[in-house]
Amino acid sequence: MSREDQIARALIAHLRRAAAAPQLEIAEPPVPLAGGFDTEIYGLRLQATPAALRAPLVLRVLRPHHDPAMILREQAVQNALADRGYPAPRVVHVCVDREPLGAPFLLMERMPGTSLLSTGPVGMDRLLLDAQLRLHALDPKPLVDALGDRSTFDGYLAALERRVDGSALSGLVEMASWLRERRPAPSAPPVICHGDLHPQNVLVDHGWISGVLDWPNALIADAAFDVASTWVILRFAPVGLASMSAGRRFLVRFGQPMLAARYLRGYRRRRSIDPACLPYYEVAAAMRALVRAGEMRSRSADGRGVSALDRSEFADRLLAHAIRASGVAATLPAHAR
């Protein structure tokens, strides 16, 4: 039996109980969707009695080692934003129990459109900026109310420190301390930060933004943190992992430095940020990926179970940049490629 068939059977059995809908059936079986380097993502449709389950849906299944609280956090973030009219997909069901599908999962609305990455580099930065600036203009209070201390940059740093200690990533201890000690004073009120905003997480439909995806890293922080996070991805992410034609992949790879620079100039033209604090936030953004890569490498010395992103050169490129930006020595565990 295929993984898709297993998921369909288990999901229907779970939803019949959870939604008290014994007649519920699959209308369109699960189909794997691109994206999600360490989650399983499927599109599907149900023949459902509950109205919330009738629309086209996306199933996002975490890996077994993930904290189940992650999906509750995503639900709180996405629904708070959807309530404000921002194009985040509304979560219609969550399950923190690992039993039904082998890991926690959520069901959310499937937003129309295609990935911004698939449209090519022309105009990509403008639409990305539109999505980010619209987010930064929202009042962050609903997210603060929904997430409490989990929404803050202090909480972000504390979580990184716990993970560094918990996975014995001794090569990142000094950089984690540097982030705590060198944090710049805020120069403006904090905003809602996506934390992982890049073209593959933005959907467009007929030239308009139709959806913004992948919210587990959202928090309330200086806008410069979100800008630095996006710039780091645009500048250093390996284009070869993205789903696109070979020709378009070549154009994007060739234009990566220009795209990153154009994005940063565009943001600064439309909203003021302190350029002096950007290097700090570039290190802060890179640190999340470095800790993740360190955890994966420590957990899988033979390379099995490591995502394509973590097997790529991304973490090593980020490490080199973080060392240059901070002046702090740092290392990652070696791993099998």
Image: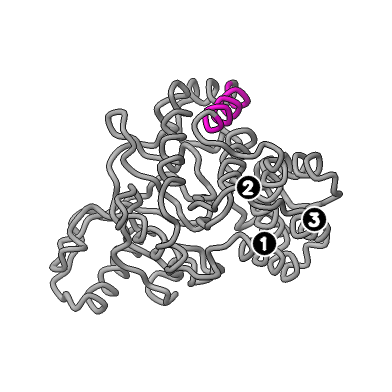
Q: Residues within 10 Å of mark 2 (few under 14, many from 20)?
A: few
**Mark on residue 178?**
3
Q: What span is colored magenta in the figure?
A: 255-268
Element carrying mark 3: helix
Element carrying mark 1: helix
State the residue position of label 2: 187
Q: Can residue 2 be seen here?
A: no
Three-letter code, disc 3: Trp
What colouring does the structure picture have?
Answer: one colour
Q: Residue at x 85, y 44 (%)?
A: 327
Element carrying mark 2: loop
The image shows residue 88, relative to residue 65, as above or below, that is above
Give the CA distance from mark 3 to mark 2: 20 Å
Please name which of the two marks, 3 or 2, marks the residue nearer to the observer: 2
x and y, in percent, of residue 22 in the image: 16, 76
Left of 181 or right of it: where is 145?
A: left
The image shows residue 299, relative to residue 82, as above or below, that is below
Left of 241 or right of it: where is 311?
A: right
Give the CA distance from mark 2 to mark 1: 19 Å
- Residue 265 covered by magenta stretch: yes
Q: Residues within 10 Å of mark 3 (few under 14, many from 20)?
A: some
Q: How many marks?
A: 3
Label whose residue precedes the other's in the sequence (3 or 1)? 1
Label whose residue precedes the other's in the sequence (3 or 2)? 3
Q: Can residue 99 be seen here?
A: yes
Three-letter code, disc 2: Ser
**Mark on residue 157?**
1
Left of 224 or right of it: where is 28?
A: left
